[in-house]
Image (tube, rainbow, N blue to C red):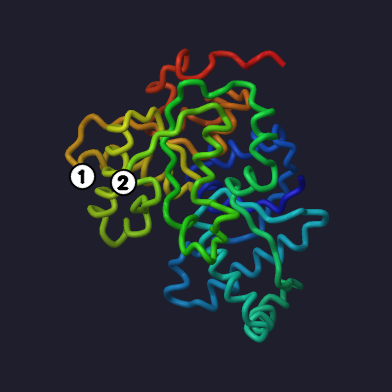
Amino acid sequence: MKVAYWPGCVSRGFTPELHGSMAAVAPLLDIELVELDRACCTGAGVIAEHSQELADTLNARTFALAQAVQGADLMMNICSTCQGAQSESQERLDANSEYRTHVNGTLAGEGLSYEKGLTNKNFLWLLVEEIGLENLKKKVKRPLTNLKVGPFYGCYIVRPTDRLGIDADRPRDHYLHWVIEALGGTVIDYAGIHKCCGFPIITMNKEASLKQAGRHLSDAQDAEADCLVVPCPLCHLNLDLQQPLASKAVGRDDLKMPVLHLPQLVGLALGLEPKQLGMSKHVVKPTSVIDWSSAVVAAPAPA
């Protein structure tokens, strides 16, 4: 499968181990990544608050770059914040041909034009809907036996449901559960699964942001999860990078919850080592918290 790949700006800049993990996992899933290295930030909803047209134009430019990739089956991202922002822009662009023509007028100087109908999916959606859970199971080399994983969807990938295509036929708000189980892990449910990590308000109210993160981490730890898995680098930042401060914000000095980006969890099950997946870069290092000899099958299963 060939995809026009948008990793997002955070995974390439602030947390390059997440981008690197996707690059390592892709060939194991028979995915050819064609990186959209000329694409820019989606705006993460912030630019749209000041100029909706600017946000839509920036995202239309990315869509046009994706459509220019010869032979690509679809566009893929590894950031649910990007998915949310892009879906919002695409909804407006696809609904109004006059507006789309106006935006394309701005892109014309680069020789770009967005045509209605691009398919853009987060890696989580692609795993379930394009690769398929049965095929994913067949590729598992190191089952996540006894690894207790708390899914953390965040907010941008689960609402609004209509825009994100969540319905009875595509219960995308349950896909993380399904993927964890397909990889051999045990799903741990807790209160914050579909709630915001707090990152969107961190520059406006840091204390509230840290308390949000701290509550989710506390709930997951109290539910005896070994780790959390997220489909979003921004959630990863707030739950991992800010975890020491979040612990203080909720009065917990015992929080030590590893946070894995989805490609990292998939990579473990497909036989890659923690070091190959950049886990030594985390603030809460999974290798120092999880007993890998018992939580995950110690060696890849025989071929």
The residue to which callout 2 is attached is 213
* Left or right position of 34 against 296: right
* Left or right position of 35 against 290: right
Front residue of this view, candidates 111 and 207: 207
Kind of residue at disc 2: Ala
Hey, which residue is sitting farthest right in the picture?
A: 71
On screen, residue 235 above or below 202: above
Q: Residue at left 52%, top 34%?
A: 180
Q: Could you say which quadrant of the image residue 241 lies in?
A: top left
Q: Please give the label number shown on residue 71.
A: none
The quarter in which the C terminus is drawn is top right
Question: Residue 259 in the image: x percent, y percent?
Answer: 42, 36
The residue to which callout 1 is attached is 249
Q: Residue at left 63%, top 60%?
A: 39
* Left or right position of 1 against 7: right
Q: Are marks 1 and 2 in contact (CB under 8 Å)?
A: yes
- Of the image marks 1 and 2, the number of the one nearer the N terminus: 2
Kind of residue at disc 1: Ala
Question: Residue 67 in the image: x percent, y percent?
Answer: 75, 63
